[in-house]
Amino acid sequence: MTINIANSPTEKKTFQGHQLYVKRDDLLHRDFSGNKARKFYYFLKQAFPHIKKVVSYGSSQSNAMYSLSVLTKMRGWDFEYHVQHLSSYLKKNPNGNFKYALKNGMKVIIDEKIPKKYNIESKETLFIEEGGRDLFSEYGLKILANEILEWKRKNNIKELNIFLPSGTGTTALFLQKNISDSVYTVPCVGNHDYLKKQFFMLEESEKYHPIILEPSKKRHFGKLYKESYEIWVQLHQEMDIEFDMLYDPHGWITLLEHIKTFDKPLLYIHQGGLLGNESMVQRYARKYQLTTPPPKGGGFSL
Ligand SMILES: *Cc1c(COP(=O)(O)O)cnc(C)c1O
């Protein structure tokens, strides 16, 4: 069992007339990509001679869940995943991350109570917080920061503005901690205060906190918005890149609203998560009664 992750490419693109760079962490590896691969890299690389099992929890369609299923499969560990709720629809029609995590041998436990580290962790069992919100994530995110620094040097870029949308904020925080360029982000789960609290849980010193941009409209995580679908299609068409449908649309809309804030070359971090689009596209299709599947580089028309 080894998996080597090569540097991900950085591409120069134009979107809505704005030139920018995209760091393609979605292309890190066929089965292990995006920011979850960066966060869980530690568990891939370190020796864990006594570990036999990983326990984690979160939503039934999370990207972290899928990445952990790949990690545990590769390492020959059992994987137990706790969800508070499983819809009867998903139970009958597994799709997206859920389907592929089950294929990798994930065992699902439905439990109202969120499992606690101190109850679960043992010599043979690792407990991983929801979404990899933990200090171990810095290990792989430091590598991401170093790749960006090396790319800057090679391309003679003195200073950058970096943008990426946040869930737990772990990726943005550890990236900012390991790079001197300004990192900008927007909360996709919860609001500004929630995200700030998440930063403080991982890092006391505010000098390492990313800059939080305010979106003009509140969007609930996981809910479907017409403008989110539209920008997702447009991103695909203009840049020939498929982005994630949960975080990236809100991220790009907010980025464009604040485009004048960025006074240095702009680098957008693509954080992967494309497997989850399978179920999102189906949900959009049901909601808007779309019948033709999205072609490559396009989408349903609304
Ligand atoms: C998990 C995830 C995020 C959020 O990452 P955090 O480190 O929790 O902020 C953003 N984008 C994608 C595609 C993700 O899978």
Image: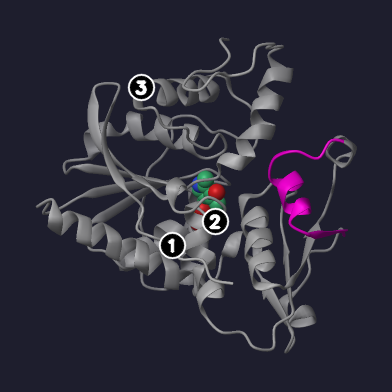
Frontmost residue, 281 versus 295: 295
Residue of label 3? 238
- The amino acid type, in three-letter code, at marker 1 is Ile
Frontmost residue, 188 versus 37: 37
Q: Are marks 2 and 3 in contact (CB under 8 Å)?
A: no
SS of the residue at dot 3? Answer: helix
Q: Are marks 1 and 3 in contact (CB under 8 Å)?
A: no
Frontmost residue, 78 versus 225: 78
Q: Residue at x 80, y 61 (%)?
A: 82
Q: Are marks 1 and 2 in contact (CB under 8 Å)?
A: yes
Quarter of the rendering containing residue 148:
bottom left
Q: Which residues are magenta?
A: 93-111
Instruction: Look at the image and tell me whether residue 221 can be seen.
Output: no
Residue of label 1? 5
Q: Is residue 255 left or right of residue 63?
A: left
C-alpha separation, residue under disc 2 versus residue under disc 3: 26 Å
Q: Position of residue 43 (x, y in %)?
A: 56, 74
SS of the residue at dot 1? Answer: loop
Q: Position of residue 11 (x, y in %)?
A: 28, 40
Q: Residues within 10 Å of mark 2 (few under 14, many from 20)?
A: many
> Is 125 above or below relative to 237?
below
Mark 1 CB within 8 Å of ligand 1: no
Mark 2 CB within 8 Å of ligand 1: no
Residue of label 2? 32
Quarter of the rendering containing residue 55:
bottom right
Q: Mark 2 or mark 3: which comes first in sequence?
A: 2
Q: Residue at x 17, y 55 (%)?
A: 152
Q: Is residue 108 left or right of residue 289?
A: right
- The amino acid type, in three-letter code, at marker 3 is Glu
